[in-house]
Amino acid sequence: MSPDYYLILATILFTLGTVGVMVRRNALVAFMSIELMLNAANLAMVAFSLARGGLDGQVATFFVMVVAAAEVVIGLSIIIVIYRTRRSTSMDAASLLKL
């Protein structure tokens, strides 16, 4: 299978993630959209790795996924703190946490 199809899928996923971040004001939806964009970038790296015939992109994608797992833990804990203090997951409520 040609890597072109993977790159088209990665472009569609990245575009959906970008639209989700720009349009929605809910922190959970924005967070999921950022993860969607990160997965699209991972798919593109694996597709380029497939086209070149090496494992470099796949190894880099593995490390990106490890960092993304740590990001999920920290990001969700921040969203939970915002929800506990403001009773809302709106992005506007996050700006009210400044001192």
Image (cartoon, helix red, strand yellow):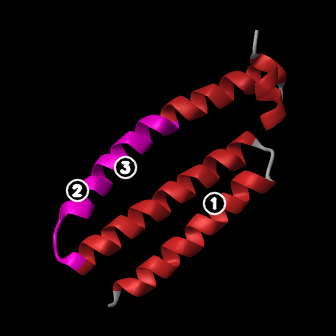
Q: Identify which amino acid the numbered label 3 is placed on.
A: Met
- Residue at coordinates 48% horizontally, 64% vertically from top-left? 40
Q: Identify which amino acid the numbered label 2 is placed on.
A: Val
Image position of 40 (left or right of 48): right
Query: Going from the N terminus, do you reach mark 2 or mark 3 first?
Result: 2
Q: In the image, is residue 54 part of the stretch drawn in magenta?
A: yes
Which residue corresponds to mark 2?
Answer: 59
Categorize mark 1 by other alpha carbons within 10 Å: few (<14), some (14-19), many (20+): many
Which residue corresponds to mark 1?
Answer: 17
Give the magenta part as a residue range.
Answer: 52-72
| Secondary structure under the numbered disc 1 in the rendered image | helix
Query: Going from the N terminus, do you reach mark 2 or mark 1 first?
Result: 1
Query: Going from the N terminus, do you reach mark 3 or mark 1 first?
Result: 1
Q: Distance from label 2 to label 3 (Cα)?
A: 10 Å
Image spot of residue 62 (x, y percent)? 29, 53
Q: Quadrant of residue 14?
A: bottom right
- Relative vertical location of residue 44 with respect to residue 95 in this rendering, above or below: below
What's the mark number on residue 65?
A: 3
Q: Quadrant of residue 49?
A: bottom left
Image spot of residue 61 (x, y percent)? 32, 56
Q: Distance from label 3 to label 1 (Cα)?
A: 17 Å
